[in-house]
Amino acid sequence: MRRQVIISVLALSLLGGCARVSQSKLNPLNWFGPSQEVAAAQAGPQTIIVPSLAPKRGYPDFQDIRTLVPTLDDVSIVKSASGAIVTAAATLPSVGYYDAELVHVDTESPSELVLDFRVQAPSAVTVVGTKAQRTITVARSISTADLATIRTITVRSASGARAVRR
């Protein structure tokens, strides 16, 4: 019993000393002190020169050589924190297609978003494979600001299109 009392008194005396350490320079949290308001330095506009990575003669005109998928299987829209995610799935004739993307197509109507489902065909003849191996899914994010005006989202393929309306 006497040993427990002595240990308790020593532990309490050490805890009492912690209050002094919290305001001392030994405490790493006190090394910088509180923030103070200072006057902003008056400086003229600064020009920062960043070297360009563009070629000297400019970029050649870009032509998208990818083809539209033959047919669409499904198009769905899922709400997300930043707006919505449009997901499209297609079954292709063989395995090996790559570089799939939903490409935005300019339209006259601001209430309609048109996307082309484009893929790059393989350069060599490949194995046909099972339906699961030939299925490709692609997604595109749409911001909340863009969704405010959009009423119809259409995804196009070579044989037709699928639309989702709200």
Image (cartoon, helix red, strand yellow):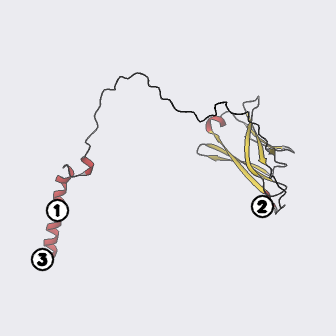
**Sequence-first disc among 1 and 3:** 3
- SS class, disc 2: helix
Residue 165: mark in rendering: none
Horizontal side of residue 10 vs 162, given as left or right: left
Quick check: 94 above or below 113?
A: below
| Amino acid type assigned to the residue bearing label 1 in the image | Leu
Q: Quadrant of residue 130?
A: bottom right
Q: Nearer the viewer, residue 94 or 153?
A: 94
- SS class, disc 1: helix
Residue 133: mark in rendering: 2
From the top left corner, tell me how far across and down residue 27 is, in percent. 23, 52
Q: Residue furthest right?
A: 159
Q: CB atoms at circles 3 and 2 under 8 Å apart?
A: no
Q: Residue at x 17, y 69 (%)?
A: 8
Quick check: 133 above or below 139?
A: below
| Amino acid type assigned to the residue bearing label 3 in the image | Arg
Give the number of marks.
3
From the top left corner, tell me how far across and down residue 80 is, in percent. 61, 46
Q: Which residue is mark 3?
A: 2
Q: Residue at x 18, y 66 (%)?
A: 11
Q: Residue furthest bottom?
A: 1
Q: Nearer the viewer, residue 131 or 11?
A: 131
Q: Which residue is mark 1?
A: 14
Q: Nearer the viewer, mark 1 or mark 3?
A: 1
Count neighbours of disc 1 (C-alpha within 10 A) and say few if under 14, some if 14 to 19, many if 20 or more: few
| Amino acid type assigned to the residue bearing label 2 in the image | Gln
Quick check: 50 above or below 68?
A: above
Q: Quadrant of residue 166?
A: top right
Count neighbours of disc 2 (C-alpha within 10 A) and say few if under 14, some if 14 to 19, many if 20 or more: few
- SS class, disc 3: helix
Image quarter hosting the N terminus: bottom left
